[in-house]
Image (cartoon, coloured by chain):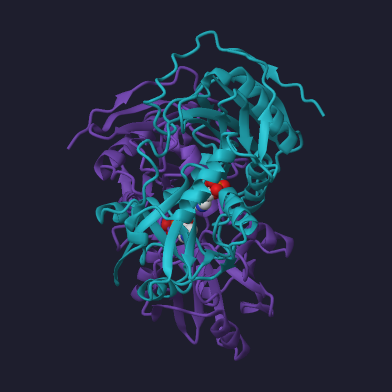
Chain colours: A cyan, B purple
């Protein structure tokens, strides 16, 4: 199916930032993709327009009741010039699961893919090429109806914006310290922890501050019911290498079904390394560490891909993992995944999606 | 302390809607109050401008990570012409508690009050006078920094918008049916349930839909840990009249500290009716009903003031409360509170706040 996407080109293209000074999510490309929704009319008027401010009524529901969902994925420039996405359809599928949970209308994933491809075609000059850099893609949906009744919005806007981002590990992959959070809770079963919705992130900022105070990069979130089972680390899924098996929290209704998580599990299975998706308590972790069985721990997510955990700080003491160094398994997963993403390594899984972009600059 | 609030008057005042067709939060007055915040600079540039769209960068953090807080209060036109607010300082205090939880900067409550008074002075012609109508006031703060890093925003905007609203009980106060929600959870201890933040409302929409499917007006929320203790009803606090005592869930870290709730408790104490703030389970409620001890139940909140509960529907059966009619106590609390709010009844508590508004039309 083809979609008629109207295109208005920017007449004032921005100066592109230097590739060694990109940072994350600070610079945006020249254009954005926009689609409107209205009850009764459905999604309509897909268009690409110059990147610009959104004007909303101050009573727009996004400001008051937080109906919003988003996604995050990246476009990679391969050394041979190909432009690659990583499992993009999975992102739009998950966007729709989030939409469902937040009582928001399903988007047409094919239209979203068509819009994304067209947007990348127009802004392909923004995909950086320095090692480790990429183009971060942020699709999101917000409720725009101006009305203060607590009810689903009758109007929404779906947008895709894009930001060239720097290498996550400019100085080589490096383990971080993590703080086991015992007071704040990220999400609970029955809540919205499985959805990629804005409120889940604002609610974590205080805990993140507590972690930072203790010299930690991120929070290890525990479940809200028993306060002992591990859920996620910061905004990443988490893996532990114990007794030669890899354990990761099961998708129990309060954590995000990460696309990197899925990919890590698939790789481990391919390598015949046993993986267990189950509940795992902090106590089990500390106990495994005590008997020398906890050899590695790492987070997984689109931004960092793999983030090795070198130490866990907690109210009941601190432990060092893998001598505070990046473990062999974490490194191998990282190299393989990034290898596939950048087209350096064969992709037996069909994860890469090659963009057909006639050279547009 | 006086604040210098710049004022830009609307040159195109809107036609005011008819007072019998106001609804809730659909029409907005001619002006709004705005203050900006930037790290290092603090809150600055307080101003009143014509009600108009807000233009934000599509990367503004409010759209992605949901840092936002809000309040809701009302201005009432007394029969003798006085313009009254109800415990407005409590709203700005609570706004700051919400700000704290969401890692957002504290506002100056005095500046907020000054802005609100000036705004009401300019738009005082918008305060309706038909019985039961009022001017709903919505102060809110949103994160505006355009950056996709998950971190507290460096920029915010504080706004106050106002909406003339119709009588909540146009046909007299009437009990509603409530659905005891056993799957979805509103909030859990350690989360953000005590804050008035946008995400808490979007997350309840699916449950609200489930309630509506069963002919119920609202959801009775249970706690996220044991799934049996009562928390709130819809976006209201909740009271049960059992054995001549009034029981309301304690402020346990997952419910909102409602200003109407506080006022109801103060009234009951004044009337020498025992009030217990404690955990109360659904089982206790059904058991009390069985032995004929549950005589009344009602919700409390700014919008409805008091909302009598005539029946509870649940997976384990339905019960009718007080013969499905508004109870005597609910009616008395409602009459007294609205009496104080509209200046018909003496206010021994110092809750009313008279606006000094020279007649501006
Ligand atoms: C809360 C949360 N958990 C986990 C992840 C990892 O998901 P993915 O691997 O799809 O990026 C993300 C997103 O990056 C997230 O926001
Ligand atoms: C979740 C929630 N609970 C309770 C209340 C009642 O609070 P108040 O009495 O201050 O209006 C509100 C707000 O109206 C609310 O949003």
Is residue A359 rendered to the left or right of residue B240?
right
Q: Quadrant of the C terminus of chain A?
A: top right
Q: Quadrant of the N terminus of chain A?
A: top right
Q: Residue furthest bottom?
A: B291
Residue A193 visible in the current orientation = yes
Which of A163/A240 is in front?
A240
Q: Residue furthest top?
A: A11
**Picture layout, residue A299 above or below residue B243:** above
Is residue A325 rendered to the left or right of residue B325?
left
| Residue A92 placement: quadrant | top right
Residue B26 visible in the current orientation = no
Q: Residue A150 location, x and y as percent?
A: 57, 50
Q: Residue furthest left?
A: B1
Q: Residue B295 location, x and y as percent?
A: 56, 81
Give the residue at x 41% y 73%.
A288
Which of A105/A129 is in front?
A129
Q: Residue B333 location, x and y as percent?
A: 46, 68
Is residue A7 rendered to the left or right of residue B90?
right
**Picture layout, residue B232 above or below residue B94:** below
Give the residue at x 77% y 25%.
A3
Which of B85/A130 is in front?
A130
| Number of numbered markers | 0
Q: Residue B158 location, x and y as percent?
A: 37, 37
Which of B80/A319 is in front?
A319
Give the residue at x 73% y 61%.
B213
């Amino acid at each position: 199916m083809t979609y008629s996407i109207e295109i208005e080109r920017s007449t004032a293209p921005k100066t592109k930032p230097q590739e060694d000074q990109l940072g994350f999510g600070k610079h945006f490309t020249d254009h954005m993709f926009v689609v409107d929704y209205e009850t009764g009319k459905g999604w309509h008027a897909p268009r690409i327009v110059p990147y610009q401010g959104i004007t909303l009524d101050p009573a727009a529901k996004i400001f008051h009741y937080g109906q919003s969902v988003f996604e995050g994925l990246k476009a990679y420039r391969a050394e041979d010039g190909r432009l690659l996405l990583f499992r993009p359809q999975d992102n739009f599928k998950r966007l729709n699961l989030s939409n469902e949970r937040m009582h928001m209308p399903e988007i047409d994933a094919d239209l979203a893919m068509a819009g994304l491809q067209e947007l990348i075609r127009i802004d392909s000059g923004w995909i950086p090429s320095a090692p480790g850099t990429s183009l971060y893609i942020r699709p999101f949906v917000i409720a725009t109806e101006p009305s203060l009744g607590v009810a689903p919005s009758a109007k929404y806007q779906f947008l895709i914006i894009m930001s060239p981002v720097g290498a996550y590990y400019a100085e080589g992959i490096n383990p971080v310290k993590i703080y086991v959070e015992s007071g704040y809770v990220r999400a609970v079963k029955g809540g919205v922890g499985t959805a990629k919705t804005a409120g889940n992130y604002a609610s974590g900022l205080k805990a993140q501050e507590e972690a930072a105070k203790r010299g930690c990069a991120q929070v290890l979130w525990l479940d809200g019911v028993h306060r002992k089972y591990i859920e996620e680390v910061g905004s990443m899924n988490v893996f532990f290498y114990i007794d030669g098996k890899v354990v990761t929290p099961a998708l129990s209704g309060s954590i995000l079904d990460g696309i990197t998580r899925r990919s890590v599990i698939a790789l481990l299975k391919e390598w015949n390394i046993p993986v267990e998706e189950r509940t795992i308590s902090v106590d089990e972790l500390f106990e495994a560490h005590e008997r020398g069985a906890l050899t590695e721990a790492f987070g997984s997510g689109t931004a960092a891909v793999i983030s090795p955990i070198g130490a866990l700080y907690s109210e009941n003491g601190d432990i060092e993992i893998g001598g505070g160094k990046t473990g062999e398994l974490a490194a191998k997963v990282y190299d393989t995944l990034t290898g596939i993403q950048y087209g350096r390594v064969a992709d037996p899984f069909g994860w890469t999606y090659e963009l057909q972009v006639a050279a547009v600059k």
